[in-house]
Amino acid sequence: MTHNSSVSWPGVQLTQNYVQQVCTPTRGALMSGRYPIHTGLQHDVIYPGEPWGLPLDETIIPQILKEYNYSTHAVGTFFIYLAYQSVHGPHMVPQRYIDQYSSHIENKGQQVFAAMVSSMDEGIGNITKALENTGLAENTIIVFSSDNGGNVNCVKEVTSSNYPYRGGKRALYEGGVRSPSFVWARNRISSLRSDAMIHVTDWLPTFWSLASLQGKLSPNNPIKTKPLDGVDQWLAISENLPSNRTEFVINIDPKPIACGHRVPHAGIRWKEWKLIIGQGGPPSGWYPAPGVEDLVNYCGPHDSYIELYNIIEDPSETRNVSDKFPDIVQMLTDKIKAYNATAVPMGNKKKDPASNPRNFNYTWMPWMDMVDRVPVGTYPLKDDLFQDEYGQYDIEPTMDACFADDETNLDMNSIEF
């Protein structure tokens, strides 16, 4: 990528880089190097005002890098963790970005979505330009990835598109967990493309290996982690060697969720095979960009508990071949059961009313030890700004609302892991 600069920024595209189906478990897996089933983040996401998160006894990336004298922060210096709000909802962006698309995109929602991408691209470009101007680019590695697939949700009007992959955010299908990603590292990359199987848990051990010069440097203090699910993938990325993994758990979730699967579900990828038990979605269809009609934009009932796909031959997951390969189904089911035996309880907790921004002059902020304090100098906002049309705060969508167009006859009590 280039931005306001004549300097070329070639990188390696990661064609099989996998994340989790939603944001919370992806970020937990990134930071800890461990599957969500091992950190209690396997069910849904952390909603505003819920007092739970990644367990504090997990060792995370910045803690490891600090032992090699890196300065770290959510936005810091050699380690920077920069999590953009774009293109997550609510879809909002300054008008000057929208104006770029007003002449050739008619749909207002799509204009805003495209403008948000441009805004994010400009911000990333500013970072790369700053790296060049300060002489830091030569000693910088950039990893770009999403934390889940684009949000399509069985809607009639598509702003996101994971096409030709199936589904999107919240789905176990490729459109929900296969992330468009790249790595840039000047003079350290030998190929422009890597087909290596990479999972979000791999970044912690990969960064650890890089910081320690592949183990040649010792940390300032001994580093203790819980058993890692990730593996070092730097040679697979930089030298286009085979991946150091042949399988990963997509997720194992024992409960249904709002705007997601209505039955317990699980998924695993092993070599070219992918098994889904329960429901892969919703969203369960294909959502092409406007004007593309190769696959039907379909969001309908699920007719099987078991879905098996050859991801190499059928990356769009159009052909469920579970009836043709019962031995593979059984083998992968046994793997899921073995992984599930290592799972920890879900960490989800209900929303704490004390977190409501009304308690802090309508400012979102940490509340666990600040219930009796109001921040100084905050802008006074009206109460109704934080309310929905029903006068409620932060209401999660109901199951009926989310699945009005995606009915199913599955018995959610019939699936056990």
Image (tube, rainbow, N blue to C red):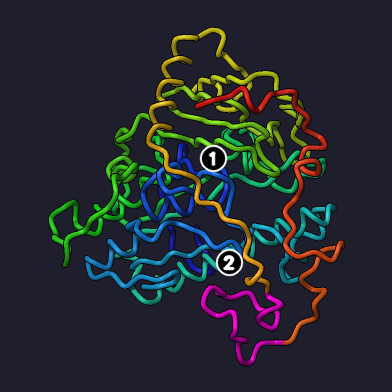
- Name which residue lies at 45% across and 14% down: 330
Q: Which stretch did the figure color magenta?
A: 357-379
| Mark identifier at residue 122 | 2
What is the total number of numbered labels drawn onto the structure image?
2
Q: 387 left or right of 46?
A: right
- Name which residue lies at 58% across and 24% down: 415
Q: Which type of secondary structure does the marked residue at label 2 adopt?
A: helix
- Name which residue lies at 58% across and 20% down: 307
Disc 1: which residue: 177
Q: CA distance from mark 1 to mark 2?
A: 25 Å
Q: Residue 161: percent from the left, percent from the top? A: 68, 42
Q: Residue 351: percent from the left, percent from the top? A: 63, 61
The answer to whether residue 71 is visible is yes
Q: 387 left or right of 374?
A: right
Q: Which type of secondary structure does the marked residue at label 1 adopt?
A: helix
Q: Residue 192: percent from the left, percent from the top? A: 40, 43
Q: Amino acid at mark 2?
A: Glu
Callout 2 environment at 10 Å: few (<14), some (14 to 19), or many (20+)?
some
Q: 23 left or right of 92?
A: left
Q: Earlier in the sequence, mark 1 or mark 2?
A: 2
Residue 360, quarter of picture = bottom right
**Is residue 369 highlighted in magenta?**
yes
